[in-house]
Amino acid sequence: MNRKGKIGLALLLGALGTGGFILAQTQSSYTGPKVEITYLHGFTGPDRPVMEDLVKRFNETHPNIVVKATAQPWGTTWNQLEPLVASGRAPDVVVVNEDQITRFIARGALTPITPQMYRSANIDTNRFFKPLFETASYKGQSYGVPISAVAYVMFYNKALMQKMGVSKVPTNRAELLTAARACTTDKEGRKPGQAGFDAKNLETWGISLYNNWVGARMAYSAILQNGGSLVDKDLNASFNTPEAVEAVQFLVDLVQKENVARPNSTEEAELAAFSQGKVCFFPSGQWYLDRFEKTPNFSFGVAFPPRIGNKQDATWGGSSHLTLPVQRQGYDPNKRAAAMEFINWMSAAPQNLVWTSTGSLPTVRAVAQDKKFETQPISGIFDKLDSIYATSGFPWGGQVLGPFDGAWERAYLGKQPVKQALDQGVDEANKQIAQARPNFR
Amino acid sequence: MTRASDSSPRRGRLFALDDSNPLVPYLYLLPHAAFFLVFIVYPVGYGLWVSFHRWDLLGGQQEFVGLTFYRNLFDPSTPQSQFFWKSLINTTLFTLISTPLLVGAALGLAVLLYRPIFGRAVFRAIFFMPGILSVSVMGILWRWMFDNQSGLVNVIRQEFWGLPVIQFLTTEGWAWVPIIVGTVWWTVGFNMTLYLAALGGISQSVYEAADIDGAGPWAKFRHITVPLLAPTTLFITVTTVLASFQLFGQSQVITNGGPARSTQSVIMYITEEAFGNYQLSSASAMAFVFGALMLVFTVIQFRLMVKDLNASRER
């Protein structure tokens, strides 16, 4: 092929490529007249410019839809959404997080999205990880789609594991116990079980457990792994079932019997110890990833929390969902259709891939396959993204999670036996749920 | 038209365009009254209304429940009665311990820094400066200082003095230490500044007279400085007590109310009920009960203050 031919081919390919690109970008499900829709979200941190850029690109590729986006702190939105809906002035699309979404659904503030609506907007709901998508479901109906996700993971210190002769990241209860014992030494270099072992003065230890709500997510994960749950089918608190007690007892035993975790510790102290190479396994939110990546000469990995229970893999996750607030009667159907197109575009794979640059996990299956993750530590949990469960599905989030976190605190600190702590938590939660029930549908 | 005497104000007609118009005093009051009505009276009235209803913005109908949410506070089987009174005891304990410290330390610092010592302005600035920090910055700082494992306080106890570690953040009782130490460090500078200003108002001639009479420094402090600062001390005590009862941020950031709610303050619990449990009517009822208790307390304090001021004038 001569030079001219090459240029011609290049131009042709270029034209085809551009055409295909334009075609792909303009395959909008919304074909009505030009409308303006409002979009309220709480991405006010370093993720704000990423979201603003995505909205800008949506507006550029959708000439008949104008999205006016507003960012405001989450807490403000949680306080304002109901009054806005009541006065008929709610934004067309609002991002709601996993800990609030069921409350707003059960208060009647959000519009259900029917299978028909998903179809018209070309949204295949199978594109999302299933438990993540179902975080926004209540009584068999869907109320939104996920666009951002975080999870409770287990960080591990590679250098310390190697020094202690632990070659495999534990994936189940027995492996965790063995590895944690191997990682534990007291100030004199003695191992747990050895004569004279001083559990009060640990030099290194196996796993970080701690008292706050983040520490309580380890207990939540263990309960789910054991086939338990926070609430029963009537949505009353039930985190004191035998499976739940057994799972939490194992964790507390790691502190009190096995001496492979420090007692009376805080998240900050464990975080510091993990960074200093004193503890092998540090379960916490994936949000510490950035911090560890920036620590010089720190060799760490990310794994899915080991399966402590005998039923399933599970860990806690948090997420943000695009939702449609209830509007006043006579709401412009074109706005709704445009909002659905916006939801479709924003939750699609290319945009989700861009969004993962903020530190979010992929919410779309296809994105998790992307090459860019292959060398990243977070890909250590990608084979189990289908096993991440939010604390949602019951409208009384505060009534359940407050007493649950309190029960974990008392059990972990040894202020109460596990059973008693969980019983007291369930009792407290159910009294408060009984009071809250009349407010919900 | 009128023959007003000098002692009684003239009363003009309603449309008079001068000071004789009877509406004049009310017009002067209006700017403040407007804000007072909109931002105080209306919200308080609305809050009272909310506390008597099962408040439901989206339900359309607001079910009247009367005193139910108030009765919950006195019914031992409800979580509200259990936690509200516990948090009130916690807050009272905090007030009882922190107020004398905040008043005493402020007085001590003020007396020391009133004298023309070297670097006086620098030290005044140093003691005042923590007060400009936000509560979250101050809270995180003291949480680090008193951390159970890696905190500076425990490291010093262990490494230098060979003492056992104290689990400050997770032990009932000890958990108050970081909160109270942090609060004193944070707010003592403000009280100190008030005392410094008051010290400037004491005439040097009084001290000179005492010198001639042969009074020592302690006698001068005890019999001149303290009595002459009494009005300031009362003012500082009242404002410090009221501020201490509003305890919120320090507990929230340092201990998150733990362990087992032992450092949870009333305001924290009301916030939990309102924005964690979304029981806004119940939270409003608690706020009114707490407000009423504060009102009683304030009236007593003002009575004492007036009585004491009168007594000091007679002296």
Image (cartoon, coloured by chain):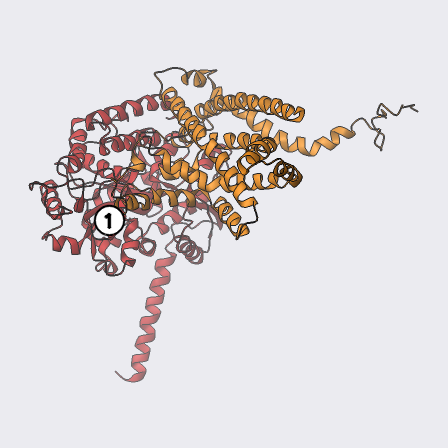
Instruction: Please identify the quarter of the rendering in which residue A299 is found.
Output: bottom left
Tally the marks. 1
The three-letter code of the residue at mark 1 reads Ala
| Residue nearest the viewer, comparing B8 with B311 | B311
Q: Colour of chain B?
A: orange
Position of B110 with respect to A151 (left or right) is: right
Placement of A386 over or under B237, stated as above or below? below
Residue A326 showing in the rendered view: no
Quadrant showing the C terminus of chain A = top left
Q: x, y percentage for residue B126? A: 49, 49
Residue at the image position 14 percent from the left and 41 percent from the top: A198
| Residue nearest the viewer, comparing A42 with A423 | A423
Residue at the image position 47 percent from the left and 37 percent from the top: A80
Q: x, y percentage for residue B281? A: 46, 24
Placement of B281 over or under A1, stated as above or below? above
Q: Mark 1 lies on which chain?
A: A
Quadrant showing the N terminus of chain A = bottom left
Residue at the image position 38 percent from the left and 29 percent from the top: B277
Position of B297 with respect to B272 (left or right) is: right
Q: x, y percentage for residue B291? A: 51, 24
| Residue nearest the viewer, comparing A188 with A45 | A188
Residue under pointer 1: A273
Secondary element under disc 1, as helix, strand or loop, is: helix
Residue A315 showing in the rendered view: yes
Position of A234 with respect to B84 (left or right) is: left
Q: Colour of chain A?
A: red
Q: x, y percentage for residue A406? A: 29, 31
